[in-house]
Image: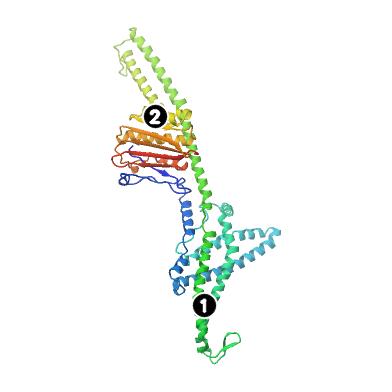
Amino acid sequence: MGTGRATAENTGAGATGAVGAPSSFLSATTAVVVGAAVGDSEAVRAAGAVGAGDRSSEVAVLAALRARPLRFPFTRDSLRCWAYLAGGAVLGLVTAVLLLALTALGLGLSVVGVGLPLLLAVALSGLPAGALERRLLRLVEPEPVPDPHRALPGAGRPARLRTRLRERATWRELAHTLLVAPPLAAAGLGLTALLLFSATLVVSPLVVRALAPETVMLIPGHAVPGPLHALPFTAVGLAGLYLGGHAGALLTTAHVRLARLLLGPREEDSGGQVLELTRSRARLADAFEAERRRIERDLHDGAQQQLVALTMTLGLAAHELRGYVDSGGGDADGADADGVDGPAGALVLVDRARGEARQALEQLRALVRGIHPQVLTDHGLAAAVAEVALRHPVPVEVDLDLPGRLPGPVETTAYFTVTEALTNAAKHSGATAVTVHGRVSDGRLVLQVTDDGRGGADPAAGAGLQGLADRVAILRGRLMVTSPTGGPTRLRLEVPCSG
């Protein structure tokens, strides 16, 4: 097999198809280019991959705490934690007040129907709150939490509203806003208060000195006589700052993990989109197959029959002319205005036209067989491959041991994979022998086409298997090519028999 190699491999839910690699790479022992089953939605794939990676990776703050546990409260990471917690506390309190007001107002006005838009606004309040929380997380996380919602370019407001209400991410954001954010905000506010009180204790000797001779009571009912007596409070404040730094890191870690869980994308968010994309590609493949069969019928019942009729008409005309010439009728030596030498010349032209019509008919029949062979429909993959092997200019050994008929998409994909491989072997590789081997193992069709040609197949030189790679990807299978320099070239197809 020669140029025009491509491969595709299913990698689960989501990945894009890929075809093509440098020829120097394919000239090595093995070349495999991998593609995914539904490569039409790059955004879905990226969002799912990033979200999964974020949820499984370690929180940056926790990693910094583990790396420098003793010095962490005095690092920039600790300051970022406190800034994040303070910002989250303010955001949580403001959000809680607004939601309580909207909920109360919406319930009060719902009896007259006016409150329903307000309750809808409460249901959708997680969208802006989640977006703000994801932006706030950038204070402590180098990698942003991706937006879990689908992009809706060009969609109108009603369509966007319906889509958002159907998305699970919307309700997870609402749960985060109503149930998770308030207690976390309260804890952040408490730690912030602890931080401020500890900072006050640290500078208590300066406060006592500045306010002297006024009485200063750091503990109610206990006056501090002088700055030296406030030094124990400074030690308590330093301990509070130190412990608060660690507590802030742990609380921030809880914030980040809950935000990744509730505000980031999940596999089920993109799973529906990936499933719909897979189904749409399968429907397109089925529609293409139906259109191809319609073209086959039109050629078989239309153009092919007309060519058959034309051949018969030309045969009858040749028969009449031949009888006329043999009987000595007409002026065999005369010529008409077109330079045809009488009936004898006309007979030559009719015979030539008849031969050309026969040649066109043979080409059309070959084209119809190539579109979708009837033997594949009637007798299955093994018979169709055997028929192709008999017509192939290079000797082909066929070894197909199949338990019976396979699903239609599997048979069609396998057949056209074999024909493409045989075509490349005849045109490009200089092969003298080709072997087609196929078995069904563990519910999968494993088909391998091997030729003894020169090898060195370059997928960048053609795209003969591109469509087959896409079809194999739809069927959750894989198509691999091995073509070292000097040969042999092997094309291996693995596809589930479930189709």
Q: Number of numbered discs present?
A: 2
At x 35% / y 30%, what residue is drawn? Answer: 396
Determine the image quadrant of residue 109. bottom right
Colour approach in the figure: rainbow
Task: Specify the quadrant of the image occupied by residue 3.
Answer: top left
Decide if residue 465 is on the left or right side of residue 240: left
**How far from the left and from the top, in percent, is residue 257?**
52, 62
Q: Secondary structure at mark 1?
A: helix
- Residue at which label 1 appears: 240
Task: Give the structural element (helix, strand or loop) at label 2.
Answer: helix
- For the residues labelled 1 and 2, the Cα–Cα distance comes to 83 Å
Q: Is residue 398 visible?
A: yes
Q: Which mark is residue 388?
A: 2
Q: Nearer the viewer, residue 449 or 469?
A: 449
State the quadrant of the N terminus. Answer: top left
Image: 288 above or below 68: above
Furthest residue in direction right, as rendered: 111
Who is closer to the viewer here, 192 or 225? Answer: 225
Amino acid at the residue labelled 2: Val
Q: Return the disc, 1 or 2, that comes first in the chain's sequence.
A: 1
Residue 48 position (above or below residue 469): below
Q: Which mark is residue 196?
A: none
Report whether 429 appears left or right of 407.
left
- The three-letter code of the residue at mark 1 reads Gly
> Which residue corresponds to the image point at 52% horizontal and 88% vertical from the top-left?
229
Tell me which corner region of the image, top left, top right, bottom left or bottom right, holds residue 214: bottom right
Dot 2 alpha-carbon crowd within 10 angstroms: few under 14, some 14 to 19, many 20 or more: some
Q: Position of residue 151 (x, y in %)?
A: 51, 53
